[in-house]
Amino acid sequence: MRWLTLWLCLLSLPATAQEERRSFGDAAAPVRLLVRSTTDIAVFGPVIDAYLATRPGLAVDYEQWGSNALFDLSLADCSADRAGADVVISSGVHQMVQLVNNACAAPHVSSQTTALPAALRWRDELWGITREAAVMAYNRDLVPAGEVPLTRFDLLDLLRPPDSRYAGRVATYDVEASGLGYLFAFSDAREATTFGALLESLGRTGAVATCCSAEIIAGVAEGTYLIAYNVLGSYAQVAAQADPRIGIVLPQDYTLVLSRALMIPKQAVHRQQAAALLDFLLSDAGRDVLTDVLLINPLTDKASAEERAPVSETALRPIGLSPALIVALDQQKRAQFIRRWRENFSRDVRP
Amino acid sequence: MNSHIPRWQMSLVARVALAVALLLAVGGVLVSVAAFAYGRQAAQDAYDRLLVGAAADIAASISVDGGNLVVDLPVSAFQLLALAPDDRIAYRVTGPTGAVLTGYGDLPDPPETAGASPAFYDAAFSGEPARYAAITRRFAERNISGPVEVIVGQTLRARRALALDITRRALVLLAGAGVLMSLLAVFVVRSALRPLDRLAEAVAQRDPYDLTPIRAPVPREAEAMVGALNGFMGRIDQQVRAMRGLISDTAHQLRTPVAALRAQADLVAGEPDGARRDAIVTRIHRRTVDLGHLLDQMLSRALVIHRAESQRRETVDLRDAALEVVEAGDFALTAPGVEIRLIIGEDAVPVLGDLLSLTEAAKNLLGNAVKHGAAPVRVGASVAGGQALLWVEDGGSGPAPEYITRLGSRFAHDSVSRGDGSGLGLAIAAAVAQAYGGALALERVETGFRAALVLPLAEGAS
């Protein structure tokens, strides 16, 4: 495990601390559940509130982390056998799979967990609790309806002309800074040969790689970026509900579908309460709340007012919780992948 | 009849059922153990192949880039390993210098003894038992030379699940086979025991007075039993016949003398003349003596015949019987002064029979000889023509030939009418001889008349 900590120390300098923290529930509650998550507090807050409504005497301390930092911290807690979070929820599911593979998780079996499809459950130690698409967001004002890319090929076509006005105004996650961005890019690379061309086009046209969903979406709304590639649909939709300038497309060639993974660390102090939270999130009531905050996405293009056929089922590519994701975190594999990425994005790294 | 069977005696069906159950239980345990062993081995083999496949996949992905070894970890290798969906995966690639190229640096090394490639070994992976496969790929490049070791490991959940699954399937099959075998056993036992049931039914349905042999077909195993039963019934039949004969004889033989006594007693009552009355009384006395003698003989005959038929047969030396007859000296009462000579040889004359019955038969013959024959009277035992003889001779001419020919009948009326009972004595002797598989031979010989019990020699008797 030495190598993992090593490269984390080297690579994830900007995100070594929690980004935000909030406490939910009675301040004097006897049991305080520590949840560490990559999900924005603003998005996940209503879910915690709904849960605590059924649980008097319980409070939740919610910490929002970047996925790489959260992975680093959880791994450190695990190797040091130190009590950290009671619940870890991350969109970097490959990192979660790695944590479980390193024997850092506690098992839990209930009627809720066994009802999950096999792809959303691994070893009864890791569970997928959400259903979110990786989408393209665009600025409705600045991107004409006829140019809205419906597939990755459309995006490639937009970037092809030497004088393309999209050059330098397409944003995507920085695969080094964002665990989720890396996972999406890695999945893209596995999914289709388009990825190579896309990477080349993005790099050639000086696309922007940045770290965080909120930043990218805000950039799209303000017109800094015309198109954001591979952003998390849930955030984009939340933003689009509030801001009519944001349009959303689920790529019709294929759409990656992510399920945020939840894990109960082996060293968790409140294991039973953690399991109860998990069961709540998997229950009908929990799913309803998650659907309300768009973490469970109906996967129809509701947010955009345009009449557009929903993505067909066969185009959906769920990122299952499988040990095959361990490959994504292999240090050589990751180094090669990032080197390839860097080679393309070398001209303009920072926004 | 059932009430005579002791309670603890287990029925044949119960015995067979117990045996079959025991067989199934022991066999079941053995097969279960074997099935589990087989299941474990099969699961081991199947998942070991996955490990080797993944390791080979990874080894093939290693390339040399300049002076460095590059491992482009193939997703397919992990998808292969993910066929064991709930198992954690351990992997490590080490270069020729022993430096870890990628993977978990803290994995257990393969045992030193495992020289082969691939080598399999069991070791822990973060506190959970796991199975590892190690394969070696040798590089001979300008900058890189030596073995590159790829270790792939996996926890054991899928193996255990498969082993259990195989075992469970085998056990389900086994249970089915067990049920089938039990049903078959029931069928087989029933059909095997059916002849016995038939026999029991035949015996139960018999008239209680029917003593004829059982003719129902029985399997060979039950033949001895049925044979014994038939023999037993045969003996009972014989004894019942003998008893009937005895009663019939007794009634027949006593009726006449008793009627005569009554007539003479009537005469005495009506006889005024004292001298004639005395004569009648004397006659009555003589008649009662004869009657007593007759009764003795009849009882003796009943006893002898009964013994001959019921007593266990032993090897008897006929010389002993002859000696016994002479030494008993019964004849001294009826014929005092008659000299009896005993003629026996050096060698034993063995027969299978009852000493008392044979002696009684010989005494009857001797009694006849003393009474009716003439001196010299001789008693002897000898072997002649492969047969044993117990004989009595006298110097007389014997009874009339027609009398001898009539001896076949059960009792001789003449003897009764004559009131001396000599015919009865011959009948006793004949019955005894027949009981032991022989015959009574009456014949004239050079020196007079001989009555002999001719019996088969006992074989192998010392």
Image: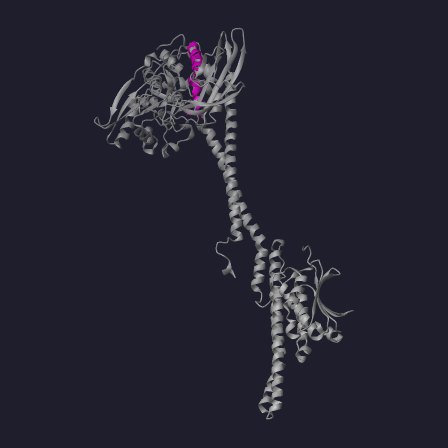
Q: Is residue A115 visible?
A: no
Quadrant housing residue A55: top left
x and y percent of residue A34 in the render?
28, 24
Quadrant assignment for the N terminus of chain A: top left
Quadrant assignment for the C terminus of chain A: top left
Q: Residue furthest front?
A: B337
Quadrant housing residue A294: top left
x and y percent of residue A174 in the render?
38, 14
Give the total number of marks visible in the rendering. 0
x and y percent of residue B188 in the render?
57, 50
> Relative to residue A287, is residue B425 depicted above or below?
below
Q: Horizontally, is B78 left or right of A227 in the view?
A: right
The one nearer the camera, A218 or B265, is B265
Q: Main secondary structure of the magenta part?
A: helix
x and y percent of residue B261 in the render?
60, 84
The residue at the point 51 percent across, 41 percent down is B26
The residue at the point 57 percent across, 54 percent down is B193
Instruction: Confirm whether the magenta stretch covers residue B347.
Output: no
- Residues shaded magenta: A316-343
The one nearer the camera, B31 or B296, is B296
> Relative to residue B439, is residue B291 depicted above or below?
below
